């Protein structure tokens, strides 16, 4: 048993909607690619890595002065900043600012058994590519170059954390 629904094609309605949606998708993709090209971490990666990142994540907009993650809490995602900036703090002390193309949250997913090692608050309105844990792990298992880059960032951050703790 089936039901058939027939929708009359009206170019004035459908073409406008389709073009607007496609234009938004292209615009978002270009924003992400621009951020990745400006990144010290990701700029040297091949284009297929960019596409893999884009399709693994979800673009999110967040207002200024909003906590994204807090030190000591469980972490289930990492982020790549597409636009805007965030402040990073540990033990209540500001330790840095991240901007377009920077990533954060990877330490919890790779090195610290799912626990955040720093707190992150938006400084400005931001646009970020959020990579949830499962798609992130799948992405890294399928892309050795990305795995190496994320691991390198995580290791460097942990070394900086140890140096701050000794100071």
Image (cartoon, grey):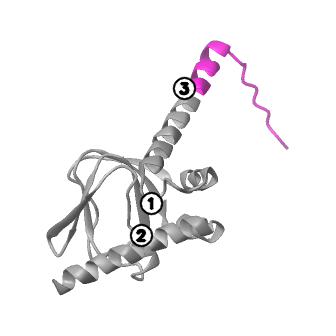
SS label for mark 1: loop
Q: Which residue is mark 3?
A: 20
**Range covered by the magenta-colored residues:** 1-20
Figure quadrant of the C terminus: bottom left
Using the numbered discs, state the Cα–Cα distance from disc 3 to disc 2 in whole angstroms.
37 Å
Q: Nearer the viewer, mark 3 or mark 2?
A: 2
The residue at 52%/41% (across/down) is 29
Q: Nearer the viewer, mark 1 or mark 3?
A: 1
SS label for mark 2: helix
Seen from this angle, which residue lies furthest right?
1
Q: Which residue is mark 2?
A: 153
Does the rendering let one see residue 72?
A: no
Q: Which residue is mark 1?
A: 41
The residue at 39%/82% (across/down) is 112
* Residue 142, x across and y down, in percent: 65, 67
The count of marks equals 3
Instruction: Please rate how many residues cluster around mark 2, counting C-alpha atoms within 10 Å: few if below 14, some from 14 to 19, many from 20.
Output: some
């Amino acid at each position: 048993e089936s039901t058939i629904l027939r929708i009359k094609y009206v170019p004035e309605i459908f073409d406008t909607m389709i073009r607007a949606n496609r234009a938004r998708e292209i615009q978002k993709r270009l924003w992400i690619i621009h951020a990745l090209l400006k990144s010290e971490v990701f700029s040297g990666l091949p284009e297929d890595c960019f596409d893999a990142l884009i399709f693994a994540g979800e673009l999110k907009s967040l207002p200024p002065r909003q906590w994204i993650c807090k030190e000591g809490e469980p972490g289930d995602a990492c982020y790549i900043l597409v636009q805007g900036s965030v402040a990073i703090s540990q033990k209540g002390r500001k330790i840095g600012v991240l901007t377009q193309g920077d990533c954060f949250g990877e330490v919890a997913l790779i090195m610290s058994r799912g626990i955040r090692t720093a707190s992150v608050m938006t400084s400005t309105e931001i646009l970020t590519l959020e990579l949830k844990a499962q798609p992130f792990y799948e992405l890294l298992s399928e892309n050795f170059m990305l795995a190496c880059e994320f691991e390198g960032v995580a290791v460097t951050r942990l070394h900086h954390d140890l140096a701050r703790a000794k100071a």
